[in-house]
Amino acid sequence: MIYFDSHCHLNDERFLGQEEEVVFRAKEAGLKAILCLGYDLPSSKQAIALAEHFDIVYAAVGFHPQNLEGARLEDLAEIETLAHHPKVVAIGEVGLDYYWENDEATKQRQRPFFIEQIALANKLGLPLSIHAREATEDMYQILKANRPTAGAVLHCYSGSVEMLREFAKLDLYFGFDGPITYKNSVNPKACVQEASLNRLLVETDSPYLAPVPKRGQTNEPSYIPYIFDQVASLRGMEKESLEQVLNQNFENLFHVKL
Ligand SMILES: [Zn+2]
């Protein structure tokens, strides 16, 4: 089997000094691509450094909505410069987070960063990896008014099935992670079943959200088969047919050959 991990943070401090082993285990598990997402300038540079070092690692650069303290819109010029690196395949992780950041002033600040980074991705012809938490309505309105022209994935999709149908009309991809393996998480499972097959992606979001049976441990890209198997089971599909479709989706969105 050939796998990919379309969203992880190998640049997280929890992996510091262990990157070689983590990537080795990912290769052993069959992964041919790992997309490492930045969340501010230093982590975006670190994602690129990892992509330069490991053949199967690719980078995304951007400002995450929870990492805007001290950031200025002018800093996006540096994101643009970084995005010209040949192993940068997306702008991300960008978006809106009203769960961790719930005062009105902080919410207000997230929107221009998000909108500007959509514009940047469109200018560069790159897809977006988008984080949305407790911000579904604003996310929808912003994406409707600022359509990504080179594609986008709503990573770790946690909205409702009804909203998934609305987002699908904007031609977005949906990324699913560990939560689809959790016993009590009903909604993400329903969303896996509802999404169009040609808009589905799997991701670990490691080091967070380890899937069952590794729940509670540090997540890593080599755990992607647990998430993949759960998608196959929820869709009632043979693993080989699902593998073909998902790998094609990844290649279509990020223009990376597996
Ligand atoms: Zn992430």
Image (cartoon, rainbow, N blue to C red):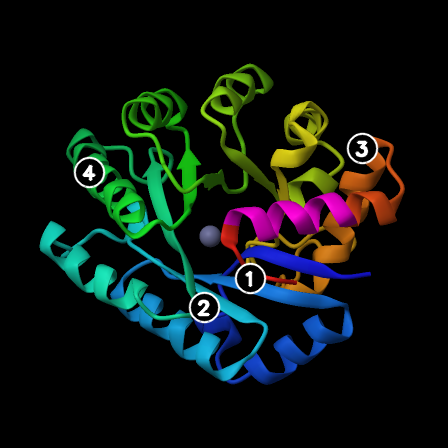
* Lateral position of residue 236 relative to residue 66, left or right: right
> Label for residue 12?
2
Q: Earlier in the sequence, mark 1 or mark 2?
A: 2
Query: Residue type at mark 1?
Result: Pro
Q: Is residue 212 visible?
A: no
For the C terminus, the image quarter is: bottom right
Query: Residue type at mark 4?
Result: Thr
Report the front residue among 162 and 68: 162
The residue where tag 3 is placed is 234
The residue where tag 4 is placed is 106
Q: Is residue 194 visible?
A: yes
Give the image location of residue 129, x and y in percent.
43, 47
Q: Earlier in the sequence, mark 3 or mark 2?
A: 2
Ligand 1 lies under 8 Å from the Cβ of mark 2? no
- Please report contact status of discs 1 and 2: CB closer than 8 Å, yes or no: yes
Q: Judging from the image, what secondary structure is the residue with disc 4 in?
A: helix
- Please report contact status of discs 3 and 1: CB closer than 8 Å, yes or no: no
Q: Is residue 54 above or below residue 240?
A: below
